[in-house]
Image (cartoon, helix red, strand yellow):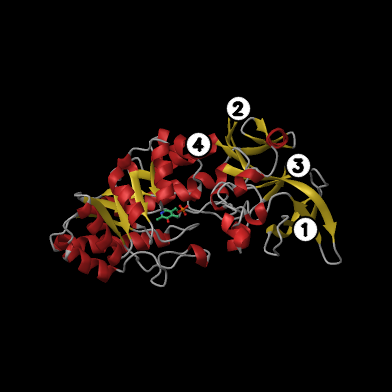
């Protein structure tokens, strides 16, 4: 599953003792296992080898250049959602033909940059966006490929903030509207509408909603065929769930066996956009205990990492396992909290956590996806350092931010003195 294990009661990432990393690089510290990262990518690749999809890793899950570089080197494409992510994709040398771009709010500048780079296609989320991309492509004298993102209106069992495939969500276009657009496709002279896209949500642990959504688009693809509209690509998005606690998510194999027959039937080239599945369990956040505080009601373990480093517990009430770096049988119920001035600043609540003292370290598990990429500088805290481990080697892939980084773009204007 992943390469974070105890050996003689000490937590290791591959062959490196995590405590050595914490001491060398400081905390809070993100630690990634190269082997776990690549292994998850290869697991998907081999599960789907029969249909050889283009696997576009979802950059927003973890956009560190070294993570992207490692996956692109293995043949992955990238799924981007902004001009900033396009910049990262180019920076790591991802071939443009392996980049797809989704987002409900692409700006003209972002659209222009993506067209000029020659990305594989845009995943278009509304009619006004389609018209805008057509207009910009015309101004650049280009024909641009787009896929229509379908909102298939399927229910998924996940946190409501990460459901994206219901008609009440802002994403995609309903089937009937998409049908009308496709009938009128000749009108968009600078677009080649070459595919359909779905992405129904994240941390989905069962195959059923994927199957249901793919069935819906398959019927739609047949309906288009009957009208003489043929497409080249079906992009099935990401969303595969991982184990944070006691979930029993479908494996890559089961997921593949459920949907490959449906995908083959469409006759289209398949694209997928996994993020969390690839990187989620490849990373941990290591924090140091600052104080153990007992109040009249509770025990709080106060650590040097908080919601600005890992916002998932605060944002989604997400569960992360908390492992001590030195394994012990002695546990006690506590809240694991950060130093930030918000009651929402917790990493775990009312949990049985190893008995620790000041200076001890704890690992927040499964923090590789939507961890660092959602980090902020709230409370003027520099963002954490990131380290990658491969075998017995460990190397920094992002330096810790220092206070000067925090104010680098700020200006104390001369105008202030005149007020
Ligand atoms: C976020 C996102 C993904 C990745 O989702 P995961 O749950 O991390 O696999 C894929 N496609 C789109 C369009 C997304 O917005």
Label 4 sits on residue: 66
- Mark 2 or 3: in front is 2
Label 2 sits on residue: 393
Left or right for 180, reference 282: left
The answer to whether marks 2 and 4 mark residues whose Cβ atoms lie closer than 8 Å is no
Residue at the image point whose x is 77% and y is 48% from the top = 289
Of 144 and 255, the residue lying toward us: 144
Task: Give the x, y percent position of residue 329.
Answer: 79, 46
Image quadrant, ligand 1:
bottom left
Quick one: label 2 or label 1, which is nearer the N terminus?
1
- Mark 1 or 3: in front is 1
Q: Secondary structure at mark 1?
A: strand
Residue at the image point whose x is 29% and y is 66% from the top = 128
Q: CA distance from mark 1 to mark 3?
A: 17 Å
Quick one: label 2 or label 3, which is nearer the N terminus?
3
Label 3 sits on residue: 327
In this view, 5 is above or below 357: above
Label 1 sits on residue: 334
Quick one: label 1 or label 4, which is nearer the N terminus?
4
Beta carbon of the mark 2 residue lies under 8 A of ligand 1:
no
């Amino acid at each position: 599953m992943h390469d974070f294990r105890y050996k003689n009661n000490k937590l290791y990432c591959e062959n490196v003792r995590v405590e050595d990393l914490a001491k060398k690089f400081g905390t809070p510290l993100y630690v990634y296992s190269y082997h776990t990262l690549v292994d998850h990518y290869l697991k998907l690749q081999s599960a789907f080898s029969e249909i050889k999809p283009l696997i576009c890793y979802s950059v927003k899950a973890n956009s560190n250049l070294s993570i992207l570089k490692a996956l692109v080197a293995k043949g992955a494409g990238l799924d981007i959602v902004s001009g900033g992510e396009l910049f990262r994709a180019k920076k790591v040398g991802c071939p443009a033909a392996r980049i797809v771009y989704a987002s409900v709010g692409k700006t003209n500048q972002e659209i222009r940059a993506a067209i000029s780079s020659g990305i594989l296609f845009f995943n278009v989320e509304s009619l006004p966006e389609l018209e805008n991309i057509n207009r910009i492509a015309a101004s650049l004298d280009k024909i641009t490929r787009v896929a229509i993102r379908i909102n298939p209106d399927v229910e998924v069992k996940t946190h409501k903030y990460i459901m994206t495939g219901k008609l009440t969500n802002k994403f995609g276009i309903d089937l009937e509207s998409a049908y009308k657009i496709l009938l009128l496709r000749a009108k968009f002279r600078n677009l080649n509408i070459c595919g359909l896209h779905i992405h129904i949500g994240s941390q989905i642990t069962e195959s059923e909603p994927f199957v249901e959504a793919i069935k819906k688009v398959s019927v739609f693809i047949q309906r288009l065929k009957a009208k003489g509209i043929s497409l080249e690509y079906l992009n099935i998005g990401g969303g595969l769930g991982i184990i944070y606690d006691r979930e029993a998510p479908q494996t890559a194999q089961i997921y593949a066996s459920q949907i490959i027959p449906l995908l083959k039937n469409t006759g289209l080239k398949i694209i997928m956009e996994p993020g969390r599945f690839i990187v989620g369990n490849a990373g941990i956040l290591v924090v140091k205990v600052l104080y153990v505080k007992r109040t009249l009601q509770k025990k709080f373990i106060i650590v040097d990492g908080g919601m600005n480093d890992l916002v998932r517990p605060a944002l989604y009430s997400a569960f992360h396992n908390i492992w001590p770096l030195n394994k012990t049988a002695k546990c006690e119920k506590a809240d694991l909290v950060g130093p930030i001035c918000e009651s929402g600043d917790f990493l775990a609540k009312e949990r049985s956590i190893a008995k620790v003292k000041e200076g001890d370290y704890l690992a927040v598990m499964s923090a590789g996806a939507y961890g660092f990429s959602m980090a902020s500088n709230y409370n003027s805290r520099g963002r954490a350092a990131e380290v990658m481990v491969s075998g017995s080697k460990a190397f920094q892939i992002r330096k810790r931010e220092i206070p000067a980084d925090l104010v680098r773009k700020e200006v104390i204007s001369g105008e202030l003195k005149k007020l």
